[in-house]
Amino acid sequence: MGTRFLKSSFSYIGLITLLWIRRDIAMAYMLYLPLLLIPRTLWESYGITLKNWAKSLKLLVLTSALFLLPFAIASIALSYSKGFHKIPLSLILIQILGVALPEELFFRGYLQTEIKEMTRNPWKSITLTSILFTIAHLFKGITPLNVGVFLPSLIFGYLREKTGSLLAPILFHALSNILFFSLF
């Protein structure tokens, strides 16, 4: 399991460097890599399930109220944002299907599960996965925004751990990105 984990991690990091060459190929690779690495019989153990969908949606609403709503209010109140902007449906779909879904499949579905299996500690797995998630974003440039993905990543990991599903982390990730684009 450890060797497979290392190979897939290096494969993913190599993929990030391809993003500036062929983003569409890289995104397809990110989406399907976890599905290729995980036997279909184990998908549920990697969070690929709708089993706890009601719990996932309740926790999504609560988490959004606790984190996204204050973020939006503070951004507008502190004049970081002039308010909400319309964003096209295509951008919303890209954020759900092309960003949140593949990133959560890989980071929370595959890596967090494998790290938890190795460490036997959910908090270590959430933290280490969040560090790797942040490092992957730093390949796009070392900016406050790219470093700032660490905190939301911890929330994504918590949602995965709490629900046993990727539904809440995928939706919260997409909502976070969509909110950011609508504010800035």
Image: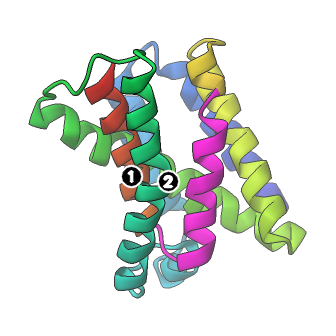
- Identified by mark 1, the residue type is Leu
Residue identifier under label 2:
104
Q: Secondary structure at mark 2?
A: helix
Q: Residue at x 73, y 65 (%)?
A: 114
Q: Nearer the viewer, residue 73 or 122?
A: 73
Relative to 136, is 117 above or below? below
Q: Residue at x 80, y 64 (%)?
A: 123
The region drawn magenta spans 148-166
Q: CA distance from mark 2 to mark 1?
A: 5 Å
Residue identifier under label 1:
101
Relative to 165, is 154 above or below? above
- Identified by mark 2, the residue type is Glu
Q: Overall secondary structure of the magenta stretch?
A: helix
CB within 8 Å, label 2 to label 1: yes
Q: Position of residue 161 (x, y in %)?
A: 63, 72
Q: The C terminus is located in which quarter? A: top left
Q: Residue at x 16, y 28 (%)?
A: 87
Q: Is residue 145 left or right of residue 29?
A: right
- Colour scheme in the image? rainbow
Q: Residue at x 60, y 76 (%)?
A: 162
Q: The N terminus is located in which quarter? A: bottom right
Number of numbered callouts drawn? 2
Q: Residues within 10 Å of mark 1 (few under 14, many from 20)?
A: many
Q: Is residue 11 left or right of residue 174?
A: right
164 inside magenta stretch? yes
Q: Is residue 33 left or right of residue 123?
A: left
Q: Residues within 10 Å of mark 2 (few under 14, many from 20)?
A: many
